[in-house]
Amino acid sequence: MTDLKPHLIVIGNGMAGCRAVEEILARDASRYRITIFGAEPRVNYNRIMLSPLLAGDKSFDDIVINDLAWYADNAIELVAGDPVVAIDRRIRTVTARSGRTESYDKLILATGSDPFIIPVPGRDLDGVVTFRDMDDVGAMLRAADAGGDAVVIGGGLLGLEAAHGLALRGMKVTVLHIMPTLMERQLDEAAAWLLKSELERRGQTILTGADTAEIYGRGRVEGVRLKDGREIPAAIVVMAVGIRPNVKLARDAGLAIGRGVHVDDHLVSSDADILAVGECVEHQGQVYGLVAPLWDMCRALADGLVASPSGYIGSVTSTKLKVSGIDVFSAGDFSGGEGCEDIVLRDASRGVYKRVIVKGNRLIGAVLYGDTQDGNWYFDLLRKQHDVAEIRDALIFGQAFASGGTDANPNAAVAALPADAEICGCNGVSKGKVVAAIEGGACTLDAVRACTKASASCGSCTGLVEGLLAVTLGEAFEGERAAPTVCKCTSFTHEDVRRLILDKQLKAIPQVMQELHWTTPDGCSSCRPALNYYLLCAWPGEFIDDNQSRFVNERLHANIQKDGTYSVVPRMWGGVTNPTELRAIADVAEKYEARMLKVTGGQRLDIFGIKKEDLPAVWADLNAAGMVSGHAYAKALRTVKTCVGSEWCRFGTQDSTGLGIRIEQMTWGSFMPHKFKIAVSGCPRNCAEASIKDIGVICVESGYEISIGGNGGIKLRGTDFLYKVATEQEALDYCAAFIQLYREEARYLDRTAPWVERVGLDYIRERIVDDVAGREALRARFLYSQSFMQDDPWAKRAAGEDYKLHQHLAEIRPLVTA
Ligand SMILES: Cc1cc2nc3c(=O)[nH]c(=O)nc-3n(C[C@H](O)[C@H](O)[C@H](O)COP(=O)(O)OP(=O)(O)OC[C@H]3O[C@@H](n4cnc5c(N)ncnc54)[C@H](O)[C@@H]3O)c2cc1C
């Protein structure tokens, strides 16, 4: 007897196609005769679990959702391994690759997505695979059996799961990610840094900012070449750079498509008899790449077909990374912006970072690393748009703490901790112990340190101890820190931060923020440049300058002026120039229509009125004439002003111009806490105005008088005499040692004048004059740090790619490192 039920055909035996069928069967099992066409030659399985399968945690049987019995029990005909190649809407039929043609009453498209393949040479080589289905996993497992190197292109969720699986299977894995941070669509910089560090600790190589130029190999893949020329060997290359909705059939059939198949709220396409569901769909401008929205869609589709139509209203999604031992959760919007408030918790000893983003008393985003227990709770608050005003202060501690609500006490977070919560990881001191000490009479930070040792070692829990003092003593605790904190993102002073960077060997901005409990996710415009400087100073040659932490002038090597144009100042060593340089400057001024050429107080020429878009070309022209940036905008050496000295002047006692040039060559480009100016005068008449500079050298018959800490700016200050030396070399050595002491000990944005006043001239004399070995060590560290300038991108940008630092600095590097 013929089955008279309407025929429902589903194209796609994947997660959405089969779930849609399940939802229909649950509502009315006898409504349709059902046929499912699947391109893959197997039953319906859980695609999400391909990652654990690759990692060896699951077998295929473990990840099957519906086995053959399910199809049989529900009278579903499965046509597996035979993809549909055409839809004829006019006569309502589908035709498969085998030639089999079936007519439908209702048709559901559930064709999922295709992995995106970046169009680079070599993408078709044997050994280049994607990560979408069982066949891909099979190819990866075969490659892993042979061992060797694997490259995964793409540091998103899928790429990292592929990398994890291949690494567990014994391959040496390199992940290439084009963006500066991993999983940038789900994680902020802080969480991404923690993730990267953990993956590197596990032995993976993670290259961010890595742009693939080609995949090379003879017949089979042998490696990947990056645009910067680096080559990474590979026996297999996995491309996991994104997906595109698979709309080919729909397009060929003339359905309305955008990025995906256009559907209405009941998942009906532009043809009333054809529905679409899953990743191939575009609903209200949205396409999805996660399963949660598919479940919502499948319910709405089944409702529309067999029950009272409820309609699909779109989905909010969350993400978890399935890499064992690494807990990552992300939901909603974490980009921040106007009206958004970040609440951040960092627990460095447990490797935990939590950030929730609140706007108008609603949670709008959450990023969790290391402790994702409360992920679902945050997600629920976010989806339901709960008012979180009542629980705002305890929100970051999770559901358990937030249940009671708190007052507006800024220390509510620490107050909400249980008594056994660890406050000081270094000494294993609990909150209960600290509170008991305070209640027992330890009313200051020092007293608590003395009683409990909390905050006495690395100091990173100082903020928490102060919070407990405030909570326990109430108004009786007034706080006690005299030194300013770096900014509102931290309770640490500049000195604390510098000390902890060295003690804890912190070598990256996100690492400092994590270890020192920064209260904001990425810092602010005050702390980022400071941290960038402190790290550059602490780890010369190791820490790579973070261009994003620099002010716009420094990034562009020019000073923005009030009309929006820029002024450009090439360096003139010791204030001396020559016809070639002057010609180059004149040419630049004419070619780029500069509006003014001005001689500056620092003895060089400022080219005014340059358009922003012309700056790279201006610098290229100046570099071609051998001129480098004068850093007229930078927290670095500005100028070394000189008078003509003994070579020309009747009163000159020494070669002040020559010495100035040599000091400038030694010092230029060095990062400093603030701008730095030097002058060398050839005699006590002091024509170079050395007595109002950061370092002033005054030449006399018997040698060189070195003074420090002067300032000719808003707060006029004459220099303090430091020491008189006999030779030019000694003058250079003292300058280098003083500069390094200032670089290592002053706060970021301290000029030398207030710094000298704060630490005292006696202290500086002790360190530079009395302590001979210490002076020599400071000088050596300065020159060592300078020797990296030729490799440093900041200096390179300023100097032009081909500029080589003076030979004597390159020579000193091995001496210092030895
Ligand atoms: C390795 C991996 C890990 C993932 N992890 C997560 C995760 O942790 N969390 C999460 O939410 N999401 C995850 N996803 C995404 C999730 O798997 C997808 O969102 C989901 O599978 C999409 O379901 P779908 O039915 O739309 O597409 P699919 O599951 O891809 O199903 C589409 C099916 O249609 C078939 N097909 C295509 N064209 C035709 C044709 N012409 N004829 C017949 N059949 C055809 C395909 O072969 C495929 O079997 C992961 C995906 C992968 C690949």
Image (spheres, rainbow, N blue to C red):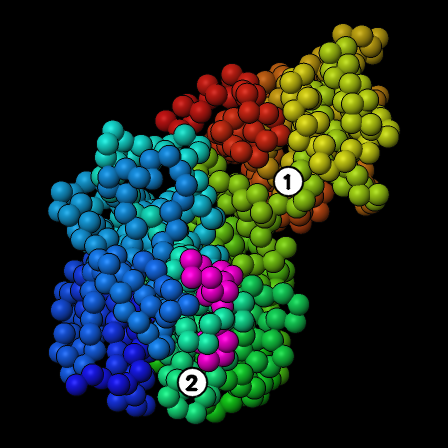
Question: Pointer 2: what residue?
Answer: 304
> At x 44% / y 25%, what residue is drawn?
813
Tell me the crowding category of disc 2: few under 14, some 14 to 19, or many 20 or more residues within 10 angstroms, Cα based: some
In which quadrant will I find the C terminus? top left
Q: Does the numbered disc 1 mark a residue whose Cβ is under 8 Å from ligand 1?
A: no
Disc 2, ligand 1: is the CB inside 8 Å?
no
Q: Which contiguous range is marked in magenta?
A: 251-269
Residue drawn at x 65%, y 24% is 620
Magenta span: chief secondary structure = loop
- Residue at the image position 25 percent from the left and 71 percent from the top: 36
Q: Nearer the viewer, residue 589 or 742?
A: 589
Can residue 178 be seen at all in this image of the molecule? yes
Q: State the residue at coordinates (49%, 29%).
A: 791
Pointers 1 and 2 in contact (C-beta within 8 Å): no
User: Mark 1 and mark 2: span between their CA atoms?
Assistant: 56 Å
Q: Nearer the viewer, residue 183 or 4?
A: 4
Query: In this figure, which residue is indicated by the disc labeled 1?
Result: 555
Magenta stretch encompasses residue 561: no
Viewer-nearest of discs 1 and 2: 2
- Tell whether position 264 is magenta: yes
User: Quick one: 679 or 237, which is closer to the camera?
Assistant: 237
Above or below for 133 versus 1: above
- How crowded pointer 1 is (Cα within 10 Å; few <14, some 14-19, many 20+) is rated as some
